[in-house]
Image (cartoon, grey):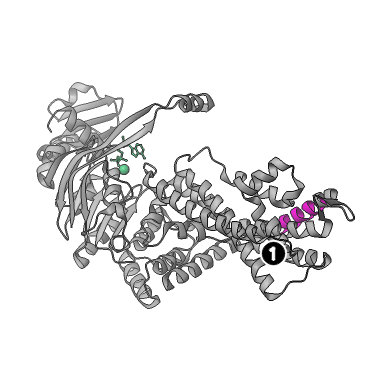
């Protein structure tokens, strides 16, 4: 276990160092994050403009959902996207061989090997949006409530991660054709609005098939104190289920790995 | 240390036309073709041996090495390396082996090798003190110094390969699999890598299995050679017995000051080609000095080069002549 912690420290230390080699990129990414958030807030205001409500969600309440979306999107840029794209590269270039020969869990290495700090401000921004929206919507949370919010956020993050890892694992078979990042982004983007804002069939899809509802809407409901306990348990169950499925699928994929020919 | 018994690997490859049409067609009616990369190979390697693995391109060398280190599952047969079944990739097994590939690199492109080394040290659970000591020992042997703190992309191919070796040996493995470790290096760098490997084997008693495109690597390092052709093992034994079968002729390339007719080279080895001023001859080793002396004597020679024929060509020829 100590070995894993130390490895993680070294992973992220080297990742940050290598990104500082390209300082301009960091600045560009920060600007891009700011602009994309402004864009989403504008879109949101079209649907949920002050005084208007959609699917029972007011403007401030919808802001909380947008905040959670921003947090998850920030996690995706910090951590999911850079690692995801490197899995595909590893498979294509055959360097996955080196990962598999290390005496460390390959899923651990591939999921956490790198980090892109440019996404961290987005996470902070998202949290601020959640706090501000919650405050304006009149939510008041006890420490226990905050713990539940964080737990559900964690569950949402785990679901997103597991989905992402499942998709990435298929690159063992479809090395060239698969642009997994785009799929991931599309799935996540639908979590920008409360699920109640979607027509019923989509609502069902987002709750049961692709559990987008648990990524953003459910944590927001917890903040507003209107989440139902069964939904919380369902969210946690799904998070664990997806994680186990992703891990099993990875082991299955590895049995089919033939290693790039050289 | 390494026991291989009737090892085979069959790759199943999709028979697919390129393009979207081909993909759809393939989706509707899957067609597969089996490629037998390794078939029924058996051998045993003792602790501390240095064994050369020879074969033309596509003979199955890389596939065999990958099965030995557990990257791919054998289709049939048994492998035991250092008391483990490689395909289980048990951490205890992984700590004892290493794989170096001339075509692939594990060092991160944008970072100095030192950063990748520190990551490896953490992953293998090597303490900071031990890691530091081992890095300084190995970098002395490899003649690496400040290169370790320069981004990998700014290193020459030779320096990069030496850093790769360092990264691969940091955890003190006792079984080394080397897949064309000298690929693309210039002659000096090749010689240095070769010398390092020989020293390392002497010092640590590590077992080494090495493939190479260059005959010189094998002659310099490996008393024992495995020759593989189209997935089958054809020779397992001392190098000299194979070398006399394999490389009886040397290639002599001449550049003359003026064109000379082909007849002029009668009795001077076997004429490969003779066009204008460039002449290629093949000469038996025992006649080499005499032939070269005569050539220099009879013609006005601008340039003269003597080479071992490339290993692929030799082996190809060997099989064409039906000697194995
Ligand atoms: N991942 C793979 N999928 C399908 N066929 C492969 C793969 N890797 C190698 N082969 C085939 O297996 C044979 C042996 O390849 P390889 O072991 O790489 O040969 P060598 O290393 O001796 O050049 C070749 O015919 C090659 O095309
Ligand atoms: Mg090869």
Task: Look at 33% across and 54% down and name the residue there.
Answer: B100
Q: Residue furthest right?
A: A51
Quadrant of image for the N terminus of chain B: bottom left
Which corner quadrant of the image does residue B312 belong to? Answer: top left
Task: Specify whether B281 is left or right of A149.
Answer: left
Which corner quadrant of the image does residue B265 belong to? Answer: top left
Residue annotated with mark 1: A121
Q: Which chain is home to disc 1?
A: A
Residue B198 versus residue B322 in the image, above or below? below
Q: In the rendering, at what x and y percent does residue B304 appear?
A: 25, 39
Task: Look at 35% across and 63% down and name the residue there.
Answer: B166
Q: In the rendering, at what x and y percent does residue B65 appear?
A: 27, 48
Q: In the rendering, at what x and y percent does residue A13 appear?
A: 53, 68
Q: Nearer the viewer, residue B135 or B32?
A: B32
Few, some or many C-alpha atoms within 10 Å of disc 1 (few <14, some 14-19, many ≥20)?
some
The total of numbered circles placed on residues is: 1
Q: Is residue A49 magenta?
A: no
Asked whether residue B63 is in view, the answer is yes
Task: Specify whether A46 is left or right of B33.
Answer: right
Q: In the rendering, at what x and y percent does residue B213 appear?
A: 28, 43
Task: Look at 56% across and 44% down and name the residue there.
Answer: A180
Which quadrant of the render holds ligand 1?
top left
Which corner quadrant of the image does residue A101 belong to? Answer: bottom left
Quadrant of image for the C terminus of chain B: top left
Task: Look at 48% across and 24% down and name the residue there.
Answer: B25
Write the start and end of the magenta stretch as one range: A30-42
Magenta stretch secondary structure, dominant: helix
């Amino acid at each position: 276990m100590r070995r894993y912690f130390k490895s993680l420290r070294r992973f992220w230390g080297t990742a940050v160092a290598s990104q500082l080699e390209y300082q301009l990129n960091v600045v560009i990414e920060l600007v891009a994050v700011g602009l994309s958030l402004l864009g989403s807030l504008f879109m949101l205001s079209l649907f949920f403009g002050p005084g208007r409500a959609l699917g029972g969600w007011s403007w401030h309440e919808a802001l909380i959902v947008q905040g959670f979306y921003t947090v998850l999107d920030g996690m995706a840029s910090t951590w999911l996207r850079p690692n995801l794209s490197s899995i595909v590269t590893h498979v294509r270039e055959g360097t996955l061989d080196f990962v598999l020969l290390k005496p460390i869990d390959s899923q651990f290495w591939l999921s956490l090997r790198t980090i892109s700090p440019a996404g961290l401000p987005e996470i902070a921004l998202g949290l601020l949006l959640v706090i501000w929206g919650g405050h304006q919507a009149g939510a008041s949370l006890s420490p226990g409530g905050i713990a539940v919010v964080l737990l559900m956020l964690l569950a949402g993050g785990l679901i997103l991660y597991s989905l992402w890892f499942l998709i990435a694992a298929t690159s063992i078979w479809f090395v060239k054709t698969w642009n997994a990042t785009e799929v991931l982004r599309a799935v996540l983007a639908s979590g920008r609005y409360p699920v109640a804002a979607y027509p019923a069939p989509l609502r069902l899809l987002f709750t049961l098939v692709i559990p987008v509802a648990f990524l953003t809407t459910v944590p927001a409901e917890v903040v507003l104190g209107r989440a139902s306990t069964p939904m919380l348990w369902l969210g946690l169950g799904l998070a664990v289920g997806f994680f186990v499925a992703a891990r099993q699928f990875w082991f299955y994929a590895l049995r089919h790995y033939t290693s790039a020919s050289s | 240390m390494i026991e291989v018994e009737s090892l085979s690997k069959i790759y199943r490859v999709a028979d697919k036309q390129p393009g979207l049409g081909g993909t759809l067609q393939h989706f509707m009616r899957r067609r597969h073709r089996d490629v037998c990369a390794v078939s029924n190979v058996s051998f045993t390697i003792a602790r501390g041996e240095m064994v050369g693995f020879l074969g033309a391109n596509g003979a199955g060398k890389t596939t065999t090495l990958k099965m030995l280190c557990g990257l791919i599952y054998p289709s049939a047969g048994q492998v035991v390396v250092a008391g483990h079944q490689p395909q289980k990739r048990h951490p205890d097994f992984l700590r004892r082996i290493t794989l170096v590939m001339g075509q692939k690199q594990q060092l991160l492109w944008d970072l100095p090798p030192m950063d990748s080394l520190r990551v490896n040290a953490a992953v293998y659970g090597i303490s900071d003190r031990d890691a530091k000591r081992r890095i300084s020992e190995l970098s002395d042997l490899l003649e690496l110094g400040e290169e370790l703190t320069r981004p990998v992309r700014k290193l020459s191919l030779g320096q990069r390969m030496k850093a790769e070796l360092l990264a691969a040996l940091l955890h003190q493995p006792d079984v080394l699999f080397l897949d064309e470790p000298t690929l693309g290096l210039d002659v000096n760098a090749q010689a240095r890598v070769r010398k390092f490997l020989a020293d390392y084997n002497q010092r640590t008693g590590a077992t080494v299995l090495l493939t190479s495109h260059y005959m010189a690597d094998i002659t310099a390092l490996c008393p024992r050679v495995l020759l593989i052709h189209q997935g089958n093992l054809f020779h397992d034994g001392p190098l000299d017995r194979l070398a006399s079968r394999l490389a009886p002729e040397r290639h002599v390339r001449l550049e003359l000051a003026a064109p000379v007719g082909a007849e002029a080279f009668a009795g001077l080895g076997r004429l490969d080609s003779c066009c204008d001023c460039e002449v290629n001859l093949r000469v038996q080793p025992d006649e080499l000095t005499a032939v070269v002396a005569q050539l220099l004597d009879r013609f006005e020679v601008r340039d003269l080069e003597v080479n071992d024929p490339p290993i692929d060509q030799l082996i190809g020829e060997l099989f064409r002549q039906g000697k194995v």
